[in-house]
Every structure is written in C-alpha cells, then in structure tokens.
Amino acid sequence: MKNYLLIIVGLCALMFGCKPGETANAEKTVAQGDKLIGPAKNDTVRIANDSLEYEVIIIDPGFNNWLYSRAKPRGYYGQPYMENRNRFWVTEWNNRVINPQQYGDMYQLRIDYDSQIDYGYEVNYLLFNYLVYFQNANNQRLGGVLPRD
C-alpha cells in the first residue's frame, strides 16, 4: 500500500495525509529519487519517491519561484541536518496548530512527520525549504536557527 505525504498550502496551511491531493490542470515539478524532472507552474511542486512510497505535494503562491531562485542548492545541507531541523520545526508547527487562539489561523493543518521514517533526501529537502520559505515569507519563527534564504 502506498503512503502519501501531502502538503497543500493555499493560505499558509500545511498538511501531510494519507490521500493524494491534485489540483486541476496544474503542471508539477516532479522529482524521482534525487532527480528533478521539470519546472512547475501554478506554484505546485510534486516529489514522488516510488521506492519509499511517499509523495509530497506543495501548493503555495510564491514557493516554487523561491525554491528555484533563492533556496540553497541540493547537497548544500546534509540529510541529517535537514531531518533535525524538520523534526524541530514540525514539532513547533504542530504545537501552533493546536493553539489557534495564540497563533491565529495561519497554522491550520497538522504535519504528520515521523522522525523514525527515512523519507530520503528529496522529501526532507522539500519540507526543509518549505519551512524556511514559510518562516521568511510570513515573518514567523518556529524556533532555533533559521538558515538564510
């Protein structure tokens, strides 16, 4: 059975779930393994890793442009570094999801990121860069050191 990691972001909501989300007529950037296949339109980025059986889809205005123009290149950060940051930031993200009175509706959906699962480099790279982008674009700090974009 294939598992899906899903990030659909419209108004700064991030979600990981068990069902694939698709947007009608949206072209995607697809990466399989560590290969990026093509540019996306409509700010949709899709990463599929069939060997790990996980898929990440991010839809957020401006993220795709930021990813190609300002994000550090693949290989700049090692996978263990990104996993550590992702674990820390996702924990803080999820704390904010359950406390909307304090943080508002910016954090609407919980991220189900399991630190015991090896999602591979591409999934961690994409999540890491989305969280960097989100923090910089929305003037939010999820804690710890924020890498410069």
Image: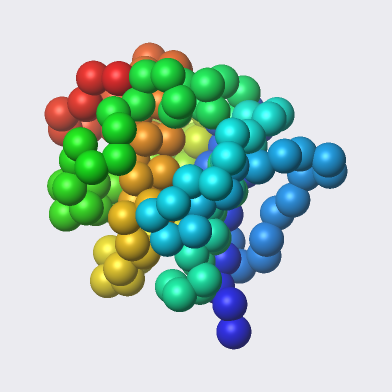
Q: Residue 24, how many percent across, how many down? A: 84, 43
Q: Quadrant of residue 141?
A: top left
- Count of all numbered marks drawn on residues in the image: 0
Picture colour scheme: rainbow
Q: Is residue 95 visible?
A: no
Q: Is residue 76 above or below residue 68?
A: below
Is the N terminus in the top left, top right, bottom left or bottom right quadrant? bottom right
Q: Is residue 65 above or below residue 20?
A: above
Q: 107 or 53: which is nearer to us?
A: 53
Q: Is residue 45 visible?
A: yes
Residue pictured at 68% horizontal, 61% vertical: 20
From the viewer's perspective, tell me whether residue 103 is left or right of residue 16. left
Q: Quadrant of residue 115?
A: bottom left
Q: 60 or 13: which is nearer to us?
A: 60
Q: Can you name the residue that lies furthest to the right here?
A: 24
Residue pictured at 59% horizontal, 34% vertical: 39
Q: 42 or 98: which is nearer to us?
A: 42
Residue pictured at 16% horizontal, 54% vertical: 80
Q: Residue 58, how many percent across, how many down? A: 57, 41
Residue pictured at 23% horizontal, 19% vertical: 148
